[in-house]
């Protein structure tokens, strides 16, 4: 219909027409290229898009993945941002959609929208030390930043990964962690909550590793992802270690349905996690940690 | 307020109101207006002015709504009912996508609504303010919602200025009423012999020209001014806004949350009648049986959700707001405080619907007063 026929009550409000480009509601099509088990209960899918995208993602961002006919869920990108022709997602099957996604075999069709959200602050980390602290599956959204840090290794000081996992069988990306550690480009400390026979590493929660981090606290950027309680305790430990709150970044989780800032499901007080996050500088969300059940 | 100053008022005789409905229908509009139904006034299609709530007014109290005769020949004396403009732009339930199998893959297709031209008569200033709040959310963010936009641009809005308020109204506190000053195509003020009419848009002027109008008498304009001022001055409920949003952020652990949480049923009525609440759920619904003619096997549906639903803050294996008091706090803090941080405007327009339609009569203006008192 023509503009002339439109009520000015709507025209005055600056009603946008159909946005240029594809509708952000519409999933793109992709196919599973490979599927591998990366821990006791996490699978990593490699996806190739039917029409490859021209832009890469920023480490820390997520996609909305659709198992057609079942549903859509937000899943972090866990692969190398430099490898643009394949998208990597690491999934733990917990609900019907993530279970369907984690079971997808090579050749299966998958829907995707994204990438969405804020990324880890790579630029702020240049010239200083980087401390990456991951709990459980929280390592998945942090792996792209480790790839990016390694790709520009000379730009950063010491890089440390502290990783806490429930048990040895839950350790994600085991071979890669060993290889990063061996080549000593990253200092790696892994701990498990509960040891099993054959485990001769550290036992305890991830915060107990913080004093081992060889970094200069005043010139360190800390990147933290894991369950909320783990992040709360980690921030306290990092702060006690001398890392200022403004240098600590977290990736928050809430129930996202649209990823477009429209559905309101990922409200976290003054922010919408999909629109303003998921990566936040700690001092922007610190008030939220002071209250339960926000 | 925004926009050009409305044109000078003209006068439409009471007997000619039907001409407005016909002028809109002649331009292809389906005309909606306030009609009494099941003991309340709701928006529905009106073909004749006889369907409007003639000689009725409503009594609203927390948890109570009754229509009663007003002993006069009015049609717009009922301030509001549970319905607002919201469902006309943000559908309570709509299909976003359909998915059909295609070889070893799928085809997903948008299902943009067939949005007919819709005129709504009897829209109040608070409803217009609420629509502009929804516009900010659905149209002015990074990802404008094409489904909302398709309906929004088809609206023709006929506002009615409020010359009386319900006991639950507090639009003066929220600076949204009682006079409609923006966002309408036509605005009416009802008086004994007819209506003062102002156009707020080019299309409004076009419709105005189709009506048998006469210049508004000075006395009628003076009476209008007095009635609007009286309506504002006699509004019973008030909400202090000067210390928002901080006063709520400071009181997140106030004992009143537990108190209101013990009264709240978590039914979600307040969010359903709220003209700005926008939370929604999305889900894929598989269609059982063989593919239909189009080969459609599932649809992605979105429908109104409420932060009072348990599932709203549920992620798998964890609920961020398990208790009713958590959810009431989320609703009120969002509505009056964090909405401002998220969208640059309050989420409350002072229409009072959440007070009237709460089955246990929880009144947010009262809750705010209690939250400002030191906790016991």
Image (cartoon, coloured by chain):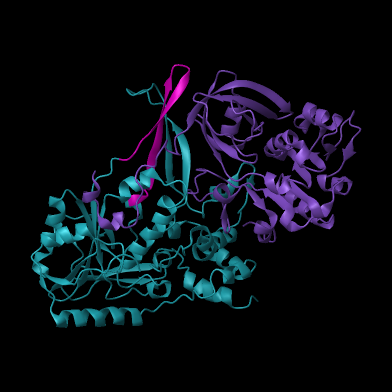
Residue under the image location 44 percent in, 16 percent down: B103
- Relative height, residue B18 to residue A20 (above, below): below
Q: Is residue B361 above or below residue B230?
A: above
Within the image, what quadrant is residue A187 found in?
Answer: top right
Residue A129 image point, x, y percent:
80, 46
What's the magenta region? B89-113
The quadrant the C terminus of chain B occupies is bottom right
Query: Residue at the location (84% across, 54% down)?
Result: A241
Describe residue A109's horizontal placement relative to residue B223 as left or right.
right
Q: Which of the chains is cyan?
A: B
Residue B237 belongs to magenta span: no
The spot of residue B89 in percent (x, y) is 34, 50
x then y, percent, for residue B265: 51, 59
Q: Is residue B304 in view from this perspective?
A: yes
The answer to whether one can see residue B38 in this image is no
Q: Looking at the image, how many numbered discs can be counted on the residues?
A: 0
Query: Percent position (x, y) of residue A78?
Result: 66, 33
Chain identifier, colour purple: A
Magenta: predominant secondary structure element?
A: strand
Position of B325 compared to A230: left or right? left
Instruction: Give above or below for B299 relative to B224.
Output: above
Q: Residue B106 lies in magenta, yes or no?
A: yes
Residue at horizontal 30 percent and vertical 81 percent from the top: B229
Q: Nearer the viewer, residue A158 or A76?
A: A158
Q: Is residue A14 left or right of residue A41?
A: left
Q: Nearer the viewer, residue B374 or B12?
A: B12
Quarter-of-image position of residue B166: bottom left
């Amino acid at each position: 219909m023509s503009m002339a026929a439109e009520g000015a009550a709507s025209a005055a409000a600056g009603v946008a027409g159909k946005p240029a480009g594809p509708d952000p509601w519409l999933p793109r099509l992709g196919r599973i290229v490979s599927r591998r088990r990366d821990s006791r209960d996490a699978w990593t899918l490699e996806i190739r898009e039917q029409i490859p995208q021209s832009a890469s993602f920023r480490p820390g961002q997520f996609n909305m993945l659709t198992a057609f006919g079942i549903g859509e869920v937000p899943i972090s990108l866990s692969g190398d941002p430099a490898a643009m022709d394949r998208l990597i997602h690491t999934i733990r099957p917990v609900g019907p959609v993530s279970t369907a996604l984690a079971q997808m075999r090579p050749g299966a069709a998958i829907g995707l929208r994204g990438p969405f959200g804020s990324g880890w602050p790579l630029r702020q980390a240049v010239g200083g030390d980087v401390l990456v602290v991951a709990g459980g599956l929280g390592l998945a959204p942090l792996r792209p930043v480790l790839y990016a840090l390694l790709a520009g290794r000379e730009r950063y000081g010491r890089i440390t990964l502290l990783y806490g996992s429930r048990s040895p069988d839950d350790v994600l990306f085991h071979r890669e962690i060993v290889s990063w550690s061996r080549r000593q480009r990253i200092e790696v400390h892994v701990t498990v909550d509960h040891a099993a026979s054959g485990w001769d590493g550290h036992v305890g929660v991830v915060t107990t590793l913080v004093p081992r981090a060889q970094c200069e606290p005043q010139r360190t950027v800390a990147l933290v992802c894991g369950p909320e309680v783990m992040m709360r305790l980690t921030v306290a430990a990092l702060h006690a270690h001398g890392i200022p709150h403004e240098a600590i970044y977290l990736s928050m989780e809430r129930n996202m349905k649209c990823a477009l800032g429209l559905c309101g499901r990922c409200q976290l007080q003054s922010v919408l996690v999909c629109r303003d996050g998921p990566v936040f500088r700690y001092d922007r969300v610190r008030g939220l940690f002071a209250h339960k059940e926000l | 307020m925004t926009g050009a100053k409305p044109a000078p008022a003209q006068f439409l005789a009471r007997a000619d109101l039907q001409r407005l409905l016909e002028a809109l229908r002649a331009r292809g509009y389906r005309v909606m207006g306030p009609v009494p139904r099941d003991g309340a006034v709701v928006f529905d299609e009106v073909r004749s002015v006889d369907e409007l709530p003639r000689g009725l007014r409503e009594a609203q109290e927390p948890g109570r709504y009754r229509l009663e005769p007003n002993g006069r020949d009015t049609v717009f004396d009922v301030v509001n009912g549970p319905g607002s403009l919201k469902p006309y732009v943000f559908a309570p339930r709509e299909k976003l996508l359909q998915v059909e199998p295609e070889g070893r893959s799928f085809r997903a297709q948008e299902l943009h609504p067939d949005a007919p031209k819709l005129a709504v008569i009897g829209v109040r200033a608070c409803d217009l303010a609420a629509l502009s709040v929804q516009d900010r959310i659905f149209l002015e963010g990074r990802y404008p919602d094409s489904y909302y936009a398709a309906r929004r641009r088809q609206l023709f809005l006929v506002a009615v200025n409020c010359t009386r308020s319900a006991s639950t109204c507090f639009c003066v506190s929220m600076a949204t009423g009682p006079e409609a000053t923006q966002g309408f195509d036509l605005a009416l003020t009802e008086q004994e012999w007819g209506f003062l009419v102002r156009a707020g848009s080019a299309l409004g002027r076009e419709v105005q020209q189709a009506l048998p109008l006469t210049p508004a008498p000075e006395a009628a304009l003076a009476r209008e001014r007095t009635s609007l001022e009286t309506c504002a001055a006699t509004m019973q409920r008030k909400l202090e806004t000067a210390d928002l949003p901080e006063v709520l952020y400071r009181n997140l652990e106030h004992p009143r949350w537990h108190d209101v949480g013990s009264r709240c049923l978590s039914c979600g009525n307040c969010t359903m009648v709220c003209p700005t609440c926008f939370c929604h759920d999305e889900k894929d619904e598989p269609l059982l049986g063989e593919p239909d003619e189009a080969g459609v096997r599932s649809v992605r549906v979105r429908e109104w959700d409420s932060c009072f639903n348990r599932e709203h803050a549920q992620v798998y294996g964890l609920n961020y707001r398990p208790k009713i008091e958590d959810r009431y706090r989320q609703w009120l803090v969002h509505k009056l405080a964090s909405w401002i941080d998220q969208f640059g405007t309050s989420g409350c327009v002072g229409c009072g619907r959440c007070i009237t339609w709460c089955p246990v009569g929880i009144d947010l203006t009262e809750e705010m007063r209690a939250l400002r008192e030191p906790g016991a």
